Image: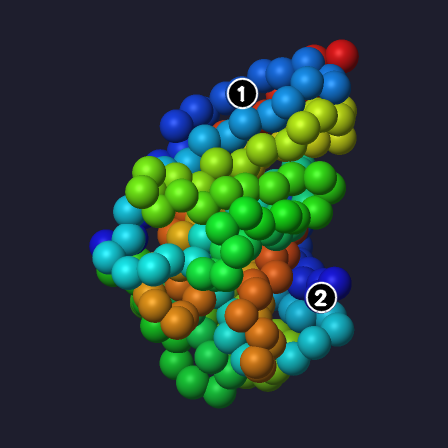
């Protein structure tokens, strides 16, 4: 079965400093991996996705993630945090090859300090 | 981007009553819709997948007679929680995917509180 583990339930950084949200995955085949962001009272928004093309994936709002097969990781990074980045972030893997059944990680709450 | 709406955004009901939640794709035709449940400070759990015009496929452990899903048109899916109990209180989120598109677009969610 496919699964994802988000290694931190809460990350707190200062505005203007780098952000690192960690995610490890388990999959019996080459996975599709996603990062979603959830702001209060808003629908989940796709930040970026990896689907076996380039291992470094660039997303919206300055976020990027690197797929590392040897480490089974898909960490999300951003060089400089902004106050508007405060939200819940989910690492997601597709559960069935070629399908769109998604398995969500537990989520990481990102807090930005002024 | 594609927009998915949910109605209502929150609902409070008495134990034993039924509640219907609507999920609409506003600017695209959703051939597949998904229903998720999210407990406080927890992740999203897929409840069921529905394709337009056919019966929903439920995940293991989800009672199909309790959570009735209808996907009667390409822009609307409904989730009815029948005979709701306090343990059904949760945040219910839908997503939709169009034909030829592998991305799911998520609604803002519906918070259900059963007293």
Closer to the observer: label 2 or label 1? Answer: 1
Whether residue B40 can be seen here:
no
On residue B103, the disc is: none
Cα–Cα span, label 2 and label 1: 30 Å
Q: Position of residue A106 (x, y in %)?
A: 41, 36
Question: Which of the two residues, B90 or A88, is positioned nearer the viewer here?
Answer: A88
Say whether residue B80 is left or right of residue A5.
Answer: right
**Which residue is at a point 50% across and 43% down the rendered structure image?**
A66
Percent from the top left, x then y, of residue A69? Answer: 35, 47
Above or below for B61 versus B72 = above
- Residue A18, how many percent across, how many down? 64, 22
Give the farthest residue toward the bottom: B53
The answer to whether A27 appears left or right of B9 in the picture is: left
Q: Secondary structure at mark 2?
A: loop
Q: Which residue is at a point 54% across and 42% down the rendered structure image?
A: A65
Chain bearing mark 1? A
Horizontal side of A42 relative to A4 (left or right) equals right
Report whether B25 appears left or right of A12. right
Q: Which residue is mark 2?
A: B2
- Residue found 75% across the figure and 24% down from its top: A83
Q: Secondary structure at mark 1?
A: strand
Instruction: Please determine whether, in this image, residue B90 is positioned above or below residue A22.
Output: below
Q: In the image, residue A77 lies at what x, y percent?
A: 58, 33
Q: How many marks?
A: 2
**Picture layout, residue A25 above or below residue B42:** below
Report the disc number at residue A11: 1
């Amino acid at each position: 079965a496919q699964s994802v583990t988000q290694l931190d339930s809460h990350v707190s950084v200062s505005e203007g400093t780098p952000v690192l949200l960690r995610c490890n995955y388990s999959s019996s085949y080459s996975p599709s991996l996603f990062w979603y962001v959830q702001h209060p009272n808003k629908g989940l928004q796709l930040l970026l996705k990896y689907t076996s093309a380039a291992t470094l994936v660039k997303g919206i709002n300055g976020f990027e993630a690197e797929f590392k097969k040897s480490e089974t990781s898909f960490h999300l990074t951003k060089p400089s945090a902004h106050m508007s980045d405060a939200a819940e972030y989910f690492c997601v893997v597709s559960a069935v090859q070629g399908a769109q059944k998604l398995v969500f990680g537990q989520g990481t709450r990102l807090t930005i300090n002024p | 981007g594609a927009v998915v709406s949910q109605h209502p955004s929150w609902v409070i009901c008495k134990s034993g009553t039924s509640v219907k939640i609507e999920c609409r794709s506003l600017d695209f035709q959703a051939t597949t819709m998904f229903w998720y449940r999210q407990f406080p400070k927890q992740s999203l759990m897929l409840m069921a997948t529905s394709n337009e015009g056919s019966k929903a496929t439920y995940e293991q452990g989800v009672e199909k007679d309790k959570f009735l899903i209808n996907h009667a048109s390409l822009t609307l899916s409904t989730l009815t929680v029948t005979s709701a109990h306090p343990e059904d209180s949760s945040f219910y989120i839908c997503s939709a995917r169009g034909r030829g598109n592998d991305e799911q677009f998520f609604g803002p969610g519906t918070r259900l509180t059963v007293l």
